[in-house]
Image: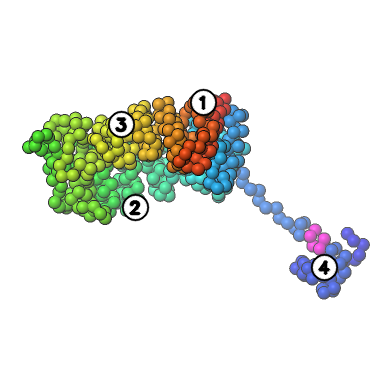
């Protein structure tokens, strides 16, 4: 305390603050500067002495245990590098350079770690949750890898609340066998939580899931009923037919259409039978000419019974009414309808039949949708046609979008083999969608077909930028063991006359990046294997 005597009655605290801001010469009542400081010290001591301690905070419960194996040290360091690089700026001028894109490797790293059932390191959980917050495509894999401790941590930071909802509505669903907890969340949960809950209960016990939905169906909003109906796709069976038949009378047109689509996926349902009768009346075998062909007589009206069974009466713009109605009838009819209706022929022979009056594209497109809806691999093979046939010629569909959906119904090896032969015959210009449905890493023949086609495109002087999408896919999907075969392509080729200026350097750079990425992916695998 200063030897200078403070005022007998210290000024109020607010006056002291004002005097300190303005100066004692403008507030003489507070005394000299020394007296002002003494008075402030006295007030501070009094305030501290009279302070009542706040109640001790309640400590959060400890983080739950995570019994999964720990990350190997090399893999832990790799994840730290990938997370640190996730926000790296894009290369100037749009060129990616020859270095691997670590941001694109992070999803693959997480998928590999989850396949091996490894546990996230505690010190990396905050950075991992930040990455998942910034990139929605990372969330499912990141939350699985973060595990129960990541969820525990997310409860203490509002910026990570997305983790509490999880990838499909909730990260902490009750045990689907716990009827009381399930009912409580179904009655009180948020919509996203209820959708996730219905899916989980449906996977555990299809009948229990359907009963849960039926109990509150009449009180749900139309848009909610539509989302809930989608949950019935999993485990769909004949037992769901009565519920779906009642939904055909729903006041929402979209709900009625979805219920009809689900019923048509059940070949033995009453709706499928009604659609089969309607479709069969429109499509028949004509034997009057030199060779058998399919004759089509599209519907002339869309009556009330057809509309109740999900046939939309109004076509989209540019589409004729009759072709629109025909397509809906054929795609909803069981595919088993057609062999008997068309002379006992197998699907491949049916698809090969000529169709009168240019109805072929419409009929084949409807059969494609039916094959996808009914998960029929035999019809999918027939509608795909031979991969060597030029697109638009021969039997089957020429639509790449339809082919991609049909391919997804085939086994992994058969799918990869079909796409490899398609690429060998036609190159890569029309293969991007088809490659997207192949299992990663690509099978050896498919990977070699892609690399060979890229080399052919380079040697032909093609614009390299036209194949940047396929190059990106190759970086993510080629087997790392293919990197040795690519070394010869990393050199800059001589620039041929007529080639795009600088194309050779771009191709070399792209192949260098591809090789570096494949080798890094191989190293990542080894690190995660410990």
Position in image of residue 155 (x %, y %): 55, 45
Circle 4: element type: loop
Q: Observer-nearest residue: 499 or 196?
A: 499
Which disc number belongs to residue 484? 1
Q: Which comes before the other along the chain, label 1 or label 4?
A: 4
Tell me the distance, in whole angstroms, between the alpha carbons under discs 2 and 1. 53 Å
Q: Which comes before the other along the chain, label 4 or label 2?
A: 4
Q: Observer-nearest residue: 264 or 251?
A: 264
Q: Is residue 48 magenta?
A: no
Q: Which residues are magenta?
A: 40-45
Q: Is residue 23 left or right of 265 when viewed as pictured? A: right
Residue at x 60% of width, y 37% of height:
81
Tell me the distance, in whole angstroms, between the alpha carbons under discs 4 and 2. 69 Å
Q: Is residue 310 left or right of 526 when viewed as pictured? A: left
Report the magenta stretch's main SS. helix
- Which is closer to the viewer, label 3 or label 2? 3
Q: Which comes before the other along the chain, label 4 or label 3?
A: 4
Tell me the distance, in whole angstroms, between the alpha carbons under discs 1 and 4. 85 Å
Q: Which comes before the other along the chain, label 1 or label 3?
A: 3
**Mark 2 surroundings within 10 Å by alpha-carbon count, few (fewer than 14), some (14 through 19), many (20 or more):** few
Residue ID for mark 4: 10
Circle 3: element type: loop
Tell me the distance, in whole angstroms, between the alpha carbons under discs 1 and 3. 29 Å
Which disc number belongs to residue 223? 2
Circle 1: element type: helix
Q: Observer-nearest residue: 75 or 230?
A: 75
Position in image of residue 455 (x %, y %): 45, 32
Residue at x 33% of width, y 44% of height:
230
């Amino acid at each position: 305390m200063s030897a200078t005597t403070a005022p007998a009655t210290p000024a109020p605290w607010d006056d002291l603050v004002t005097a300190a801001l303005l100066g004692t010469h403008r507030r003489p009542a507070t005394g000299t500067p020394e007296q002002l400081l003494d008075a402030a010290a006295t007030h501070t001591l009094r305030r501290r002495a009279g302070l009542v301690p706040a109640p001790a905070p309640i400590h959060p419960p400890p983080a739950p245990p995570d019994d999964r194996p720990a990350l190997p040290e090399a893999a832990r360091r790799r994840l730290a590098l990938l997370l640190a690089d996730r926000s790296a700026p894009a290369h100037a001028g749009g060129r990616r350079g020859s270095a691997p894109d670590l941001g694109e490797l992070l999803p693959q790293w997480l998928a590999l770690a989850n396949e091996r059932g490894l546990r996230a390191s505690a010190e990396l959980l905050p950075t991992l949750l930040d990455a998942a917050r910034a990139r929605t495509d990372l969330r499912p894999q990141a939350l699985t890898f973060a595990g129960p401790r990541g969820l525990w941590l997310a409860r203490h930071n509002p910026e990570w609340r997305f983790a509490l909802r999880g990838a499909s509505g909730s990260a902490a669903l009750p045990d689907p066998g716990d009827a009381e907890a399930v009912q409580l969340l179904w009655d009180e949960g948020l919509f996203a939580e209820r959708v996730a809950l219905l899916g989980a209960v449906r996977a555990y016990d299809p009948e229990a899931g359907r009963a849960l939905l039926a109990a509150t169906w009449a009180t749900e909003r139309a848009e909610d009923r539509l989302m809930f109906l989608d949950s019935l796709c999993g485990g769909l069976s004949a037992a769901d037919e009565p519920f779906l038949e009642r939904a055909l009378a729903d006041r929402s047109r979209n709900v009625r259409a979805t219920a009809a689509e689900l019923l048509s996926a059940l070949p033995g349902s009453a709706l499928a039978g009604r659609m089969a009768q309607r479709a069969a009346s429109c499509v028949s075998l004509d034997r009057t000419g030199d060779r058998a062909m399919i004759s089509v007589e599209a519907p002339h009206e869309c009556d009330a019974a057809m509309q109740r069974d999900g046939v939309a009466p109004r076509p989209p713009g540019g589409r004729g009414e009759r072709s629109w109605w025909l397509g809906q009838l054929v795609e909803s009819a069981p595919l088993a309808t057609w062999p008997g209706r068309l002379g006992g022929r197998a699907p491949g022979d049916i698809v090969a039949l000529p169709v009168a009056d240019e109805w072929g594209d419409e009929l084949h497109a409807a059969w494609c949708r039916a094959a996808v809806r009914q998960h029929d691999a035999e019809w999918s093979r027939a509608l795909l046609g031979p991969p060597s046939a030029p697109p638009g010629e021969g039997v089957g569909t020429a639509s790449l979008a339809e082919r991609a959906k049909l391919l997804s119904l085939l086994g992994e090896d058969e799918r990869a083999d079909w796409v490899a032969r398609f690429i060998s015959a036609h190159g890569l210009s029309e293969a991007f969608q088809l490659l997207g449905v192949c299992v990663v890493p690509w099978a050896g023949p498919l990977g070699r077909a892609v690399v060979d086609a890229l080399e052919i495109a380079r040697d032909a002087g093609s614009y390299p930028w036209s194949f940047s999408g396929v190059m990106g896919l190759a970086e993510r999907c080629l087997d790392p063991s293919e990197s040795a075969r690519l070394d010869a392509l990393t050199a800059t080729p001589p620039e041929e006359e007529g080639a795009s200026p600088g194309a050779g350097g771009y191709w070399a750079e792209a192949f260098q990046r591809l090789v570096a990425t494949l080798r890094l992916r191989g190293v990542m695998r080894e690190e995660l294997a410990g």
